[in-house]
Image: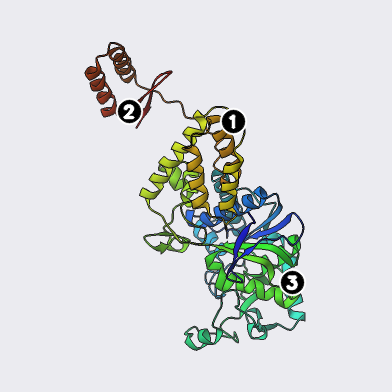
Amino acid sequence: MKLRLFDTYTRSVRDFEPLEDRHVGLYTCGPTVYDYAHIGNLRTFIFEDLLRRTLEFNGYTVTHVMNVTDVGHLVSDADTGEDKMEKSARRTGKTAWEIAEYYTQAFIQDCDRLNIKMPTVLCRATDHIQEQIDFIRCIEEQGYTYSTSDGIYFDTSKLADYGYLARLDIEGLQAGSRIELGEKRHLTDFALWKFSPKDQQRQMEWDSPWGKGFPGWHIECSAMSVKYLGNFFDIHCGGEDHIPVHHTNEIAQTEACYHTHLANFWMHGYFLQIDEAKMAKSSGEFLRVQTLIDRGYDPLAYRFFTFSALYRAKLNFTWEGLDAAAKSFDRLRTMVYQWGEPGIVDEDYIDQFEEQVNDDLNFPRALAVTWELARSSLPDATKKATILVFDQVLGLRLAEWQPQEQVIPDEILELAASRTKMRQEKRWAEADALRDQIIAAGYEIEDTPAGPRIKSL
């Protein structure tokens, strides 16, 4: 089946055709490294990993670029307030540079725990200041900028289709605004370069043609994506919250400088919610991968949990839902392990799986195909070989998993041995009573041709 993807820019599902034969340029907005990523953030990164794996499953070579925002993201998306990096540095007593490095490494560790592939290029904003300055100068030369006392701003009124990605009602926004514009000419104008305060020295600041300061949040992605992928590439991804501001402004910058809307497809992952509210770092209360580990969950159980909803549908998180996913995931990988050595794949099931993932990454249905195969009457070796092909996309590390050795107490082993003797003597009632004692003690016993198998409940 032809790969079809939903494009936010056109608001339609379209056939995917790469701009360059068999090669895909993919840019995904990365973390702002002032704190740990929470599992809501990571749902978006899992979606982007599934997209990349699906592209590779279809035979494409993918150049995947991800930025790390380590400067310029202010507390308010409206270019006001303190830089999140400087604020975190003040809170922790560390330098902004130390904060950036620490949380970048924490993000990389979380990606490994969730089996999210690292990008081909992981680029930090602070390593690309000159590229950002050059991009701003290009925008300036095209006549789209103006200067205020606190920075260089993009004049959105000069771009006829500004806000098209988000279908922004610019006139309605202006009429309904209660925000003090200050020196900004229009509500939607945004900072390209911010000047350092005259009365203090920032930890992160650079010289520029306009004065000492730091880049605005949006310019880094335009500059770095163009550097590594060109000024029009295949797919740009991020969270749904990027649609009205960050990605809208990325497009504006690139249209002003290069007269393209940057990417052929714009794709967005939707929020993870708790009690129908968005999980956010700003609340101070959020769940990390480490939180799940501390509660005894395998992080891959959370990856499995995210398959229960389409990437562009909101997903509500509950501990009960994660429990159910963890049990289902454990059942699947136990089955795969017990099937022994893989054999020859079943091409019909491969086609069914491919049909679902190629239908705009429909992983709920792809998972249904996986369970249908697991419960089928095909030989175990065929089922294993086929599911391991699926796992190239699912990313559940099914081939690597082995059950943990359990230490069964001697008294439980003695009960099991007595039960086996009762069964051999056909003393069924006594055998059942011993089984009930084993269950009451927190263990289950399964009779197999190789003898009883005991494990904790």
Marks 2 and 1, the one that precedes in the sequence: 1
Three-letter code for the amino acid on which mark 3 is drawn: Phe
Q: Is residue 146 left or right of residue 45?
A: right
Residue 398, quarter of picture: top right
Residue at which label 1 appears? 342
Marks 3 and 1, the one that precedes in the sequence: 3
Q: What is the CA distance from the residue labelled 3 to the residue labelled 2?
A: 64 Å
Residue 249, quarter of picture: bottom right
Front-lying residue, 440 or 453: 453
Q: In the rendered view of the protein, which quadrant contains the N terminus? A: bottom right
Which mark is on residue 135? 3
Q: Is mark 2 on a helix, strand or loop?
A: strand
Q: How crowded is mark 2: few (under 14 residues within 10 Å), some or many (20 or more)?
A: some
Marks 3 and 2, the one that precedes in the sequence: 3
**Which residue is rendered at x = 54% and y = 85% of the image?**
181
Q: Residues within 10 Å of mark 1 (few under 14, many from 20)?
A: some
Tell whether label 2 touches label 3 (CB within 8 Å).
Answer: no
x and y, in percent, of residue 12 in the image: 58, 68
User: Mark 3, mark 1: which one is toward the viewer?
Assistant: 1
